[in-house]
Image (cartoon, coloured by chain):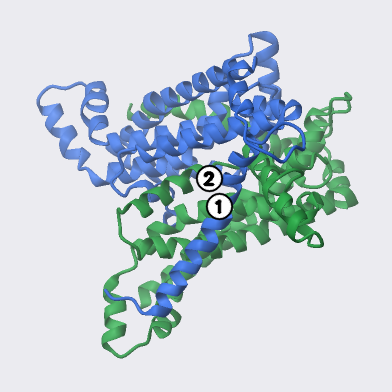
Amino acid sequence: MKRSIGVRLWRWSIISAVAIYLLVPLYAMYDFSTKPFGFADQGRTFRAWQMIPTQQDLFPAITRSLITAAIVMAIILFLVVPTAIWVHLKLPALRRPFELLCLLPLAIPAIVIVVGIAPLYRWISINLYESPITLAGVYSMLILPYTYRSLSAALDAVDIHTLAEAATTLGSSIARIIFKIVMPTIKTGIVNGSFIAIALVLGEYTISNILNFKTFQVVIAQIGRSDGNVAVAVSLASLLFVIVLLLIIPTKKRQGSVLDVDAI
Amino acid sequence: MAYLGVLPFIAFTGLFLLYPTWNVISGAFEDNYGVRSTAMLKEIFNSPIARTAFGNSLELSLKTALVGAVFGALFAWTLATGKPGGSFYKISVALSSALAQFGGVMLVFAFLATFGYNGLVLTLATKYLPNSFLADAGWLYSMNGLAVLYTFFQIPLMVLVFLPTLENLKPQWREASDALGGKAFEYWLRIGIPVLTPSFLGAALLLFVNSFSAYATANILINLGDYLTPLQIAIALTSETGGSNPAEAKTLSFYMVVVVVISMSAYALLRKKVSKWEQQR
């Protein structure tokens, strides 16, 4: 389709306006992180980048965040996905309530969940021990709507009833049907959900800060108080990491539908 | 028997989602000693500090939801009408997914590196535009500064949310409009915009809730407990001087939930009307 000059002008002005707004701060981060210390105006230095490995708290925090992300993914894989399949297969009457429950976190601000869970969290960390499991539990609730969206889109695209019937006829157990037959067919949906989980856990600050849990973001904020250049370098590095991660996801134009508001 | 299969999930969501929600809602009707009372609800409702914070939160959320929705929708349109699956499309979508999660610590650093002291734009501005507001980092810590920061994650979120809707717009409608002699602006005025409006409002609502509940960005940037409701809640919950006041935190949270529920119900009503209208077509 040939576009008129007016439309092309529109397109390019929108693209450049949004691109400038989104890209200038990213470039400024690079600029800032390579500035010489103090107010000297000359030259570039990679001092801040070289100092990243020397940050004491950083690597334990990254490990802690990644462990939390792994627990969140385990919760999705072994709890949310099987339940979604189970409801699809065996309890069609519960599909609507299940959907509502999964979308509920959209209506409840994260800070409200923190307020509600703080007493329980305090009790657990005083009486048992401080573990990332509570945090992972809250996180998995936060991404539940997104997980649900990508899962239900994937489940609707496959005729899992026929698959399940065929498997039952051939003598499969229900666990085998869920984990070995249905789950592989909705792999893309699961993979997408997991990447969102990683992005969310690495970027989350509100809950971990209030619950006093030193995750990646909490430590970046802490570094920022002593050395701004290093904190900016770490932020830029982690952002680039997430973008590369998202670029290599095997998508089939499914990305956007993760969050389809039309169905809310 | 089949119902047993959902038990683990119910128990889990019960512990991490329903229990906290219930805790907040019931806690709003109790004082700090667990005695039923509506004193706190009234006190917060009449407190000028809480009211100002609530007003600030609402203003910020409305502004950034509107600006984010408009620019995000326009950008999504350029993606939807561009080459599908091309590298511009792919990179934009990946960048949007990353930046939509970008709120908080890193966002503040990015903007401090841009407009803050010794930042890129500020350095340039002091050289070439010493009289403009850009030459002083003060504006970053105001309502407008916060709004500029919030818009940074609102636009990408809007792109993600609105892109599928635009991609579902049938090209046949455009062709029919063209074939009947309609001009481009007539197509948008009479077909495109009316069809897209409900989804647009839904997406804008999502953006509204998103910034209404955002805490991290404001907490790091301004660190003033009274400015926005989420900051106030965090202070009430974790006050380090030992003056923590869980009842106040719960009551403020309760009011936040009320706002979200009201806006979501309004949207649900609107959708119902629209779907009726769609059936009658």
Question: Which residue is under mark 2?
Answer: B99
Q: Chain of mark 2?
A: B
Residue at 28% across, 46% down:
A252
Q: CA distance from mark 1 to mark 2?
A: 9 Å
Q: Chain of mark 1?
A: A
Label 2 neighbourhood size at 10 Å, few (<14), some (14-19), many (20+)? Answer: many
Q: Colour of chain A?
A: blue
Q: Residue furthest left?
A: A170
**Residue A182: horizontal and vertical position, in percent?**
24, 32
Q: Nearer the viewer, residue A207 or A252?
A: A252
Q: Is residue A223 left or right of residue B131?
A: left
Label 1 neighbourhood size at 10 Å, few (<14), some (14-19), many (20+)? Answer: some
Q: Is residue A17 left or right of residue B81?
A: right
Q: Amino acid at mark 2?
A: Leu
Question: Which residue is under mark 1?
Answer: A22
**Residue A40: horizontal and vertical position, in percent?**
75, 37
Q: Colour of chain B?
A: green
* Looking at the image, residue B221 lies above or below residue B12: below
Task: Report the mark closest to the observer, 1 or 2.
Answer: 1
Q: Amino acid at mark 1?
A: Leu
For the question of whether residue B58 can be seen, the reply is no
Checking the image for residue B49, the label placed there is none
For the residues labelled 1 and 2, say whether their Cβ atoms are less than 8 Å apart: yes
Q: Secondary structure at mark 2?
A: helix
Residue at 43% across, 26% down:
A73
Residue B14, picture quadrant: top right
Is the N terminus of chain A in the top left, top right, bottom left or bottom right quadrant? bottom left
Residue A160, picture quadrant: top left
